[in-house]
Image (spheres, helix red, strand yellow):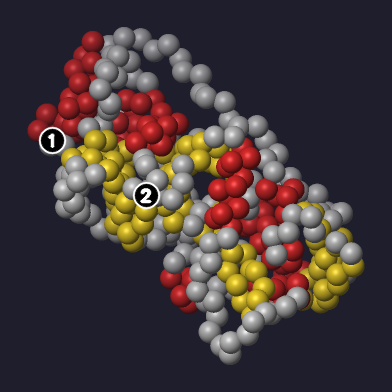
Amino acid sequence: MTFRRAAVFAALIALIAVAPTSGAPTSARVSVYFLQGEQLVRVTRPGSSPADAVRELIAGPTSQEAARQVRTYVPHGTSIRSVAVVGNIVTLDLSSRFTSGRDPASLLARLAQLVGTATAGDRSLQVQLLIQGKPVSGVFPGVPTESPVTFRYLETPDAPLPPPAREKRLPVDPKLRVVQRRFISLGYLPAGSADARLGPQTQEAILAFQKWERLDRTGVLDTRTRARLRTAARPIPRISMTTGKRAEVLLDRQVALLIDDNRVVSAIAVSTGKPSTPTPPGHYHVYAKIERWWSTPFREWLPWAVPFVGGIAFHEFQIVPTFAASHGCVRQVPAVAHMTYDFADVGMPVDVIARS
């Protein structure tokens, strides 16, 4: 899929509307951008000007939106000093609270929210940000804000797609081939992968097995893991459905199950949303498949993305810890992410389960 097509999908995500604020009916609406997972989502609120939109942004998500893990990175207590629109430039003067904190991800996300909201997603408009009446410099990583910024600029990748990792030629261990065949029979490795080498795919299988069996998540083929492997059974889906392909994400185990006709085809070690940005439990469906997804707020690549609710998706990531650590997405190591992408179909059910 070309980047242009991926950008179209990203635009579709940005147009996902969630429940508006209750109140008196009005025909005039403004667009406000929050986050869900790794992407922006658009909500509409009563209003007719950039100032109205920014005020709604500062007010934050409603309780109904927050229940769906729609969130904001705009600091509480941010205030508007002035808003002016001249030609295609929206000049926003905000209080210093807007630039508080040092977390790069939070700073980038709030800037993307602000630019999207002030321009209603119009990529031809520009935003000049002022803090306490002065231009801002060196605050938002990789984004120069001394001059006006466009939404198009934030949507455009500023780094190349990470190249595939170069695997070292590892030594052959005949004993490991026996273990790999056992993992294949249990659904932790694909058929034909018993190469007797301890590569990334086998290391991921070891960790997935330990997570499913509730062993220590060492990623090492230790004594306890070997002993359990001798008596283990193939993982069983938590929800019983008899036909078709689907996926389950088990938050407590940090494992994803790829299932076909109620049989687990593959069990995968994942890292879901951390406590502050959790992956929301629920029943969803895959709505797109995007080879190269770009996160507009966090400005990073999310290859082999399979989104299933808002900006929340299965995707490849270089760093996949043994615990929940993402912004809400389901991270997978490069060794298996492409496999999930190939398995998934648009419309495929995805169940996110809190306790398995």
Position in image of residue 101 (x %, y %): 67, 61
From the viewer's perspective, tell me whether residue 351 is left or right of residue 303.
left
Position in image of residue 178 (x %, y %): 19, 17
Which residue shows up at 73% across the image and 59% down it? 122
Position in image of residue 94 (x %, y %): 78, 71
Disc 2 element = loop
The residue labelled by disc 1 is 232
Quadrant where the image shows the N terminus: top right
Q: Are marks 2 and 1 in contact (CB under 8 Å)?
A: no
Which residue shows up at 28% across the image and 26% down it? 190
Which residue shows up at 26% across the image and 32% down it? 188
Q: Nearer the viewer, residue 179 or 9?
A: 9
Disc 1 element = loop
Amino acid type shown at disc 2: Gly
Which residue shows up at 40% across the image and 46% down it? 346
Whole-number angstrom distance, CA of label 2 to CA of label 1: 32 Å
Which image quadrant is residue 116 in?
A: bottom right
The answer to whether residue 68 is above or below residue 214 is: below
